[in-house]
Image (cartoon, rainbow, N blue to C red):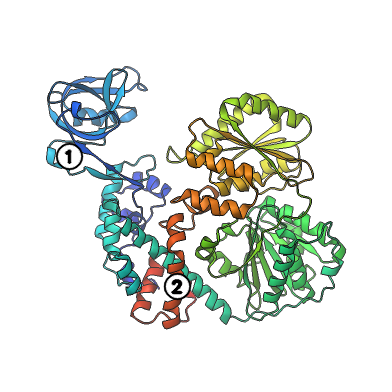
Amino acid sequence: MRPDLLNPLFAEIEGLDGVGPKLKKPLERLGLARVRDVAYHLPERFVSRRAVPDLDAAGVGEQIVVALTVTEHRGSPSPRAPFRILAQDAIGNVIALTWFGKAAFSARKALPIGERRWVAGRLDQYGQMLQIVHPDHIAESSESATARQMEPIYRLAEGLTQPRIAGFAEQALARCPDLPEWIEPGVLDRAGWPAWREALAAAHREENAGARDRLAYDELLANALALLLVRADNRRRRGQALAGDGRLTDTLQLPFPLTGAQVRSVAEIAGDMAQESPMLRLLQGDVGAGKTVVALLSMLGAVESGAQAAMLAPTEILARQHYETLRRMAAPTGATVALLTGRDKGRQRESILMGLLDGTIDILVGTHAIFQDTVNYRNLGLVVIDEQHRFGVGQRLLLTQKGRRTPHVLAMTATPIPRTLVLAQYGEMDVSRLDELPPGRQPIDTRVVALDRLSDVVDGVARHLEAGAQAYWVCPMVRDEGENDDLAAAEARYASLKERFGDAVELVHGQLRPEEKDAAMERFASGRAKLLVATTVIEVGVDVPSSTLMVIEQAERFGLAQLHQLRGRVGRGTGKSTCLLLRGDALSEVGRERLALMRETQDGFRLAEEDLRLRGGGEILGTRQSGEEAFRIATLEQTSRMGQMAQDDARLLLERDGGLTGSRGAAARILLYLLERDWGVQLLRGG
């Protein structure tokens, strides 16, 4: 049960003054549904303004507050044209205050002709005329204008303004109760951090590194605690010891020898499965490192022990591909492999359900459908989760309740993660790393090409398709400029490529319905479409060996880990593959270094470490691009710097107070509920 103390924070957002049905939708688009969400919607940056006596004292590009007298309203017959109000400063300089769209009506009211107002905004120049576009504030007195010289800038959605969000944040902060301290006193003293409530208020008010660090540490501590509780709970559970005898794995006819890393990982997994306490292991493999073979050997080991195995994939198309691969590879062993997705209906579905119940199906592959209430197993011993980042810890816990006894869990991810971040994201799991590539894989020829050579690139794609091969074209996700800009970029590129290549082109993006996305991917995977244009918000996790060209537009916008993931979509067959990184003109030093590293190496683990070094404060490994952010507050830099400290603090607390019943333990429970890691609390006996 959530503590009553937190009820004001978990109240619906409609309880805030000014939130009606009209504003509820844009707030929800920002993920703001409760008072707590608003309190934690921290400013992205702060604008510092300077009060100036006149425009001569200010520079173009500067954020200012200045007193102006309105001289003229200059409308336009076209609703698309800007609406301008002309005004003069104290010494007669003329400036245009400019609005676009529907804002003109309120601008007329706020700035009556002949009246003096204090205007805050960014000073720009349009031709010979000075202007402020969409002033941030208009005040009738100098006091209220200059009070906002340091102003927070929040992420917005259409229909919201900065003052609106700032007002809601102020109300949310007023409802924050005083909470007991959950951080170890020694840690708190050394860091000199404020209490939780003061830290939250300071983070909304000013650039305050200490307040931000404190809030990030709270999140890292809650995460570490919850993951350690999962681990402790797992050790208490009874699983089944599964020790294979080799009768199936020995009959496998692999076309290549296993790498040293694969042999080591198979042994680590077998060692875990031979224990009664259920395995929780993460298999980290670089793109193409052979995770599927390791998973198959582990699943056959479970079958040899009289148990069943299930493999969970994040999308239907990926589930189908895994099914085909596993069925082909497992054929000589005689193990039965079946596929179950949400699409399977009627008799086909019934026969699969019966086969699981009577044990004639050894290995089941599918999407979330394989864990519905109606799906029951004779003896589920091992669950393999592909693309681990798609499944949160809460979902993993649900999976483990499917067997008569808790099944072993092997999670897999193709995202190489720096060692400093593995604990923060997978603290409850043991980790195996596949850090060698199988022999015979050809390196991918990676080149950097200027965007102004676009027509040459399109001609190159044409030659590539004419030769019978396939290609990907990835468009970037454009941040903070409207949520559909990435979609617009992809659609514009798709339209221009379709003019050239006709029906050979397919478009896939995150706004498509799942069945439309699957159909488009299916056309590409089957070879009926030759060129796939995609945004990065989708998981392009498709194995198409005949696709040997990857074009990544505005490659400098991506993190290294993403570029590496995207590049890994080619080079999967025996043919030579190429990756073209199209770069814009304005290339930063970091952007230049990223692209140079991509040319230099294909080692995903090295690239992940370099990504961490270059990104600094970015989000963890491009998780925003892949659709799930591990942390809401903690940046990558903070996670790297404070993650181990939070882990040690959490371990110390659990060693001293395993049930979180003492005073600091009770405060830690509040933290787990506050930051919605309460699945950790549920695992404590008597939760």
Q: Earlier in the sequence, mark 2 or mark 1?
A: 1
Q: Which residue is mark 1?
A: 145
Q: Which x, y percent locates residue 24?
A: 36, 48
Q: What is the C-alpha distance between the residues marked 2 and 1?
A: 47 Å
In the image, 281: left or right of 164? Answer: right
* Residue named by callout 2: 648
Vertical order, 264 against 615 (above or below) = below
Quadrant including the C terminus: bottom left
Res 30 visible: yes
Q: What residue is drawn where x is 27% and y is 29%?
A: 123
Disc number for residue 169: none
Residue at position x 67%, y 80% in the image: 275
Q: Which residue type does callout 1 highlight? A: Ala
Other-residue count near label 1 (Cα within 10 Å), few / some / many at <14 / 14–19 / ≥20: many
Q: Say which of 212 and 607 sits in front.
A: 607
Q: Position of residue 513 (x, y in %)?
A: 59, 44
Tell me the amino acid under the disc marked 2: Asp
In screen coordinates, is 659 left or right of 52? right
At 69% across and 71% down in the image, what residue appears?
A: 269
Q: Quadrant of residue 256?
A: bottom right
Q: Nearer the viewer, residue 382 or 516?
A: 382
Q: Where is residue 436, by image quadrant?
A: bottom right
Foreground: disc 2 or disc 1: 2
Res. 658 in view: no
